[in-house]
Structures are given as structure tokens and as C-alpha cells.
Image: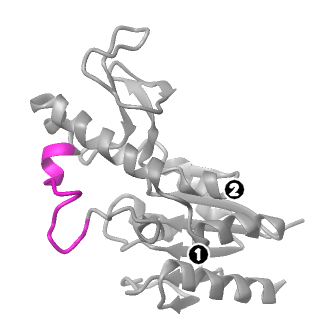
Amino acid sequence: MKPTLVVLTGAGISAESGLKTFRDSDGLWEGYNIEDVATPRAWRKDPQLVLDFYNFRRQNVRDAQPNAAHKILAELESDFNVHIVTQNIDDLHERAGSTNVMHLHGEIMKMRSVLNDELTYPVAGDIKLGDLAVDGGQYRPHVVWFEESVPMIVDAAAVMHQADYFILVGTSLQVYPAAGLVDYVPDHVSKYIVDKRIPSVGHYSNIIPVEQSATEGMAAVRKLLLDCL
């Protein structure tokens, strides 16, 4: 039986594919204040602005390509039972070939009715005001906004608990509740932390810091993991 490798990824893994993180130095996300485009309040105030922002981001995701870090994680499925839990709303893990991906914060390539969180559809182009689901609700991006609950967090915690090996790559551990998921990884499990700036990992044991970019760091971690087999 293959050992279970659990991976928690954040914006840093997709940054090398050209997708900006929302914690860039200017405090803006693609030139917008987060409060104006990524909260329920923003949607109530100006749904057109919110749709425009996510339509723009969706185009960016379509134009981006999976990088070496995404591809390494997909290739590791040959030797490990890989579970990816991602904070990212892009589909780069899937396009790289990963087959078991849980999106904590939703998926930008899907849309849903404002009246039913579970009524989702794929979306390739733009979402427009007046585009309605079968239940009559306006379509919105299928993403979890700030100030909204994270429905997948309980399932994600259960996945963490299954880890024989754990990788944290490209996340600052500043966004909750996702940052708290590391608490559910068993203490004895080796925890590889890949980031150009290693985040504070508090009281966790068996930490193996890999202070490199996602692409360079994942190449190093792949070798370390395969040497464990």
C-alpha cells in the first residue's frame, strides 16, 4: 500500500505561474482592495464590480500554466497516495495531473446560484448580471469570500490526520481557518515546509524547512521523499 502524502498549498505555488497573491506588498489584490471585491458586503454593494474582478481573475487563470511544483505533486502519485488541500481557487493542480484535490476556498472555474451554495456549474467565460441559475438566483463565483464560512474545513482536517508525510508549500499560515489545519497533522509525521520565507510554525514537531521557491523546493522535497521509500 502506498504511504499517504498530504499537501497543503497556498498562493505561493501558483505565483510562479504568474498569478498574484493577495498579500503583495502594496496591500492590493490585482489593484483592488480586498474589502471591495471579495466579501459579501462588496457583493451587496456593487455586484458588477465583484463580477468584473473575478471575470478578470478567471481570464488570468485560463492564461496561466501549471509550473514544475504543480507537476511534481502530480508525479508523486506514482509512489504516494497524494491528497492535496489547496487554498487556491485556480485549477492548476488539476491541469498538472493531480487527481485528488480539495479546494478549501472554492473554484474560480465554477459558478453557483446565490440562493443555493450547492447548485454549481462550470464557467468558461464571464459571469454577467442577469445570468440566472435554474432556481432563479443570480450566478456568483463559486469561491469563499472573506467573512464567509469555509464548508470544507472539517473534511480537510480529517485528511490532515491521515498523513504519513506532510508538505506545506506556498502559504503564509496567516489565513484562518486554513492555517489551523497543521494542528491536525500527527506529531510524529515529517512536515516539509517549502517557502522562500519560512512561516512561523509554532509548536509543531518534526519540521523540515526548505527555504526555496515552490518549484525549487518541491524538486528538493521529491528527492527527500523518494529516499524515504
Where does the image place residue 199, in percent across and percent down from the top left?
37, 82
Type of residue at label 1?
Ile
Residue at which label 2 appears = 97
Q: Mark 1 or 2 closer to N-term? A: 2
| Segment colored magenta | 23-37
**Disc 2 crowd, CA 10 A, few/some/many (<14, 14-19, 20+):** some
Task: Give residue 24's quadrant in the image.
Answer: bottom left
**Position of 193 relative to 164 (above/below):** below
SS at mark 1 in the image: strand
| Numbered circle sitting on residue 220 | none
Image-based side of 229 in relation to 173, left or right: right
Q: Residues within 10 Å of mark 1 (few under 14, many from 20)?
A: many
Q: Quadrant of residue 227?
A: bottom right
Q: Residue at x 56, y 85 (%)?
A: 216
Residue 27 belongs to the span the image colors magenta: yes
Identify which residue, 213 or 147, lies in the foreground: 213
171 relative to 149, above or below: below
Q: Which residue is more in the foreground, 196 or 148?
A: 196
